[in-house]
Amino acid sequence: MKHILLTGATGFVGRQVLKKLSSIVEVKLSVIVRPSKVYQVKDIASIKKVIVTDDLFKESQTWWENTCHDIDLVIHCAWYAEAGKYLNSSKNVDCLIGSLMLVQGAVRAGVKRILGIGSCLEYNIDKEVLDVGTELKPNTLYAATKVSLYEAWRLYLKQEKVDFIWCRLFYLYGEGEDDRRLVAYVRKQIKQGKDVLMTEGNQVRDYLDVSVAGGKIADLAIGKETGLYNICSGQGITVRDLAIKIAKEEGGVSLLKFGAVDKKDIDPLVIVGVPNC
């Protein structure tokens, strides 16, 4: 039976990974959570151990080595991701440093397989259609720290003969989504009978349900493949068309106010992934 340690188990993506892993009888699960989040996982039968810490990114290499004792696989979903703030927050640096402590401790404990979560924003997004061979060109602190972690883990784990998987996420929506993110925002505003203030909505994005993404990540983690993977749909849709689709489902197309918000200068026109899993 494979013993898996999951970070970020109560987060937007992590909870979907947890859900998929919980359906697999051949795995034993341990999770790391903050004290305020224990209630979300304490009654999940598949979880054999709940490890509590105020901030896993401040834990030492020794703490990680002890925590990873008897662990076969680490899935690292935790990261600072507050909507509207995370892209250039200095907390990304804390996440990077803490994740380096994690990998060193895990390797010293004898972990033989590690999966990390990256972002499509690591790529040169001027290329518009992004496959795993697209050059990297981060233009936010979030993306830069993800690239730094990817490169450090890739080289270190190769040297230590540890299997490494890196999953670059594109635009996710669905269960547990922050109300400030597009899909959740549109639904919330319409349900409250309020105007949905948007740009013209001409941006093309690659959207994928987070439950599907979580399943893909879990499958890659417990499989035998290694390397880099795009977690995406491979299909582009304009923000306008997606908003209209959601508004029709909620019965509030008239509340959509396109052009009420200016498009950000750094917001590229097209980001679509090429899936390889």
Image (cartoon, rainbow, N blue to C red):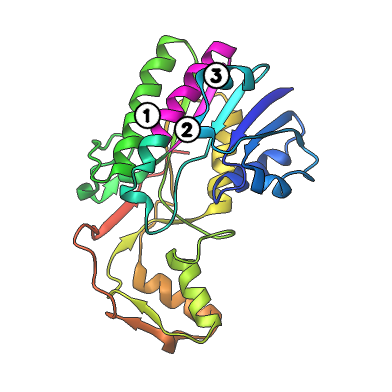
Q: Earlier in the sequence, mark 3 or mark 1?
A: 3
- Residue at label 1? 150
Q: Amino acid at mark 2?
A: Gly
User: How far, Cα to Cα, is label 2 from label 3?
Assistant: 13 Å
Q: Are marks 1 and 2 in contact (CB under 8 Å)?
A: yes
Mark sitting earlier along the chain (1/2): 2
Give the residue drawn at x 18%, y 61%: 265
Residue 18 visible in the shown view: yes
Identify which residue is drawn at 37% across, 29% down: 150
Label 1: which secondary element: helix
**Predominant secondary structure, magenta span:** helix
Membership of 148 in magenta stretch: no
- Residue corresponding to mark 3: 106
Q: Secondary structure at mark 2?
A: strand
Q: Amino acid at mark 1?
A: Tyr
Q: Residues within 10 Å of mark 3 (few under 14, many from 20)?
A: many
**Of residues 103 and 274, the one drawn nearer to the viewer in this rendering:** 103
x then y, percent, for residue 235: 39, 56
